Amino acid sequence: MCVIGKNKLVEMIEKYKVIYPYDSNLLDGDGYILTVKDETTLHYLEHKNLISYEVVFTPPDTVAHLTAKSRYGRMGLSFLNAAKVHSGFIGRLALELVNLSNDRQPIVIKRGDPLMHIEFITRDGSPSPYTGPYQFQYMTDEETAMYKAVIEKKFPTLFNQGNLDRMVKDRII
């Protein structure tokens, strides 16, 4: 396993839409910086889920790892969810946050603020794609159709067609 470099990441973005929408200014080292879909304020000890602005797709031969921007950690924002995105996952990420600031002040995160680093890592072995209830979460009908077409064209054996249709139909909107 190894971290996918910037040039390969750009190729994956163009070929598979592993990040959508994509802004080249948010490339960072060997990863990408995900932004926030909606502005929110977290009060002291408050827990909220923030949704990424970008849709993430991890092709079957990759997983992704997340790390928080240190700027928020210094404010006292703590990230509760695991730092892994399963292979085969498609959707916006729900980032679980809690305000643990020492000064007990609210933390404001604005729409479009850079929040989380994502790096893609190659994986070995047979594909075992994510098929859980969060597949295609928080995606529009147009985005879902676009990714369904990518899967059907580039990875036709990744999902059983019936399961793919079910995941699209049952997605969290």
Image (cartoon, rainbow, N blue to C red):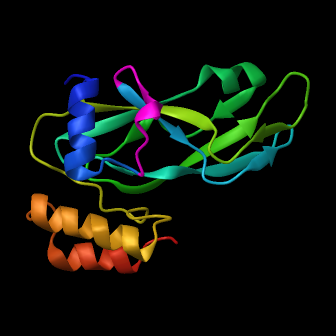
55 within the magenta span? no
Q: Indicate the quadrant containing the N terminus: top left, top right, bottom left or bottom right.
A: top left
Q: Residue at x 34, y 37 (%)?
A: 64
Q: How many marks?
A: 0
Q: Is residue 145 placed above or below 102 in the rendered structure? A: below
Left or right: 16 in relation to 85? left
Q: Residue at x 8, y 63 (%)?
A: 157
Q: Nearer the viewer, residue 10 or 103?
A: 10
Question: Would you identify the image quadrant in which residue 76 lies?
Answer: top right
Q: Nearer the viewer, residue 12 or 82?
A: 12
Give the percent coordinates (x, y) of residue 42.
80, 43
Q: Nearer the viewer, residue 92 or 80?
A: 92
Q: Residue at x 25, y 23 (%)?
A: 5
Q: Which residues are magenta?
A: 21-30
In this rendering, does residue 71 appear at all? yes
Question: Would you identify the image quadrant in which residue 10 lies?
Answer: top left
In this rendering, does residue 155 appear at all? no
Give the percent coordinates (x, y) of residue 151.
19, 63
Left or right: 56 in relation to 60? right
Give the percent coordinates (x, y) of residue 67.
50, 28
Q: Nearer the viewer, residue 31 or 106?
A: 31
Q: Is residue 80 placed above or below 74 in the rendered structure? A: below
Give the percent coordinates (x, y) of residue 79.
62, 34
Q: Residue at x 29, y 46 (%)?
A: 58
Left or right: 172 in relation to 166? right
Question: Would you identify the image quadrant in which residue 85 lies?
Answer: top left
Q: Is residue 102 placed above or below 33 in the rendered structure? A: above
